Image (cartoon, rainbow, N blue to C red):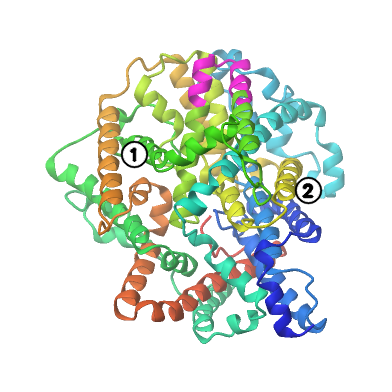
Amino acid sequence: MTENATAKDNQKTSGAKIRWRALWIGSIFALAICLITPFNNAYRQGTPLGGGNFPLAPFYLLIWLMILTALLRKLLKGRNLLTGKELLVSWSLMVLLSGIAWTGLARTFFINLTTPYYFSTVENRWQEVLHPLLPQSWYPQSEEAIVAFYNGLTGGRQMSWLEVFDHIPWGAWLGPLLGWAVFILLCYFVMACIVSLLSKQGLYNERMNFPLLRVPLLMQEALDNNELGRLFTNRFLLAGLLIPVCLHLLNGLNFYNPSIPSIPTLILAGQYFPKQGLFSGFNKLKIYIYPAFIGFAFLTSKQISFSFWFFYIAGALLIGLFDFLGFNIPAAALGVTFGPTISRPEETQMIGAYLVFFGFLAWLARFHFRDIFLKSFGLKKDGDNEQEWLSTRQAFWGAAVGGFAIVLWGHFFGMPFFLSFLVIGAFFLFTLVATRVICQGGIAYFTLTAAPLDAIIAFFGTKFFTGAGIVVAGVLQKVLFVDLRESLMPSLLHARKVTDQTKNNHRIFLIIMLTLLAGVVVSFIAMLALCYKFGVRELDLDWATRTTVAVYDNVYSLVSSPVAEPSKWVTIFTLAGACVMLALVVCYHRFYWWPIHPIGYLTAYSSAMWILWFSFFVGWLCNALCMRYGGVQLFKKLRNFFIGLIIGDFLMAGSWAIYGLFSYSSYMVLPN
């Protein structure tokens, strides 16, 4: 086969079947990531292998798999062992599981199941107030098993991993794990059905850009056209790649040998701003320098990247403006909240903003919803579904039946039926909005400000909650629906984009579900083995412990002192956020010249923007200058430079992470 013939054949891969070998490769590497991630992240305290919505380990493996495939293709005279499309599907499977192994599930899951017993004291009165309300089947009913989980097995450090596995008190854990697995897998199935059902709206009707997929898709195209070598030797890409390579080589060497000089990547700029007055909101300002995130920002739409840093600055100015005008809103006015980072009443604007933006997305998809309804009830022919994960009818009824089962699951364990329906609906509503922010905004590291339960309490107080209902809702939210930096649904939407136009998507959907099942099992085993070998006290799980204890503290506060009426200030700011978002979406939709995207407002108080605002500012500035003075032609050239920043950052992060597995500690390249 000639090289030209091979290139022509590769160009047709977008409509070809994904072979079993690609699915097996992706699944095996994904499970390996699940096994290694807890050890690397919690024990070695290294760069997270699965951190964020563009995780390190899968992309690092993708780069080397593509290079290896290109070399084998040359050695075997054009034989196509794997196509670029197939490698992207393998990468998608790795991405799906990388989050499950850490913040997406395993990082806080077992701490969630042990906190109400291990941290119960006479002072906090959990045993008296909370224990009677806890569903007993959710928790291990063995004090010895819980104590050993935090302190480690006696002699655990000297045991082999197989010995640790054998000494884990499985009798205490199997019941709770099986029960929770039902809830987790039901949620994953419903998420997959929703993505299959709604993806056409984003892929075809709105033609979303998917900035986080730009680099993998470009690499795929280069490999399928036999031009991967040309891509990696592009002078602009090499120039961009050298910057993070030199930066992190020097700083990494400094980490292990402080006598070597380093280049600072964190600037504490807050010291240059006053603690009172108009600019007091910048008193804790930090400037983080992450070349990869500058690259992502450059590849994102100018309107979106501008909106991210603009609203971060505007949010800080609002705090200073209130101080300047003498509005002293006490933090106590916030009341009891479950948001992972929420600390001021002003930040509850996000509750109203999320609800209005969800309504805007629903309005944009109104014709798609009508089409779904007609097809699901047999009033319209479903058409050819060969290139879909599921047919419209299957996806609709799968989501409906699965969602109803989750509602019944919550009701069975103590939530009133209406409350269970309301809570589960809020969970998926917030997750859908966050998915849009991540996938359309190209933000690889995203956290919620307010939690779904904060929205319910802001509108209704706790009058719909029973004591058991508050406990169940708070725990369910902590398990899957509040720490969204590695949420599954954005990764599912990215996987749906990658698998678009392939002919055997039904098979891919089945493999995705089986891989998710295997990933949950492997993540559970890896986390339990790690904790029983070393003990939670010896691991880097302070954040997981602190945030989980805070959830039970908040639940206790609401059980002992129910909130009859929402806080006045929370109501004011929630309504203000809804009004601001309504104005933004109307202007965005009606005026083509409008420079601000509503997505930016949703991230104004997210902890992600504390870290990424400067990267988006630099990326936006470079993009704007490039398009203004060089146009599309210059953009295509400079794009390779920023792709080089991304590839270089991840190559160095992966290389230092591997070194860290065999060292006493690990140099951090990407945010934790």
Disc 1 is placed on an element classified as: helix
Q: Does residue 38 sit above or below 22 in this rendering?
A: above
Q: Which of 429 and 124 is in front in this view?
A: 429
Instruction: Count residues near mark 2 (Cα–Cα under 10 Å), then give few for <14, some for 14-19, many for 20+.
Output: some
Q: Is residue 556 left or right of residue 650?
A: left
Amino acid bearing label 1: Ala
* Residue most extreme to the left: 325
Q: Quadrant of residue 583?
A: top left
Give the residue at mark 1. 353
Is residue 548 visible in the rendered image? The answer is no
Residue where numbered disc 2 is placed: 157
- Asked if 274 appears above or below 571 in the picture, the reply is below
- 489 shown above or below 135: below
Residue 318 point in image, percent of width and height:
22, 46
Q: Is residue 408 or residue 260 the one in the foreground?
A: 408
Q: Which of marks 2 and 1 is nearer the N terminus?
A: 2
Position of residue 475 measured from the top left corner of the image (x, y, whole percent): 56, 28
Q: Main secondary structure of the magenta part?
A: helix
Task: Say if residue 562 shows up in the picture.
Answer: yes
Nearer the observer, disc 2 or disc 1?
Answer: 1
Side of 604 where 153 appears, left or right: right
Q: Which residue is drawn at 60% across and 12% down?
A: 132
CB of mark 2 within 8 Å of CB of mark 1? no
Q: Where is residue 277 in the image (x, y as percent from the top left)?
A: 16, 49
Residue 160's tag is: none
Q: Position of residue 9 (x, y in %)?
A: 71, 74
User: What residue is drawn where x is 51% and y is 58%?
Assistant: 671
Position of the N terminus, as image quadrant, is bottom right
Q: Which segment did they paint magenta?
A: 405-423
Is 444 displayed left or right of 332 in the figure? right
Q: What residue type is labelled 2?
A: Arg
| Residue 413 part of the magenta segment | yes
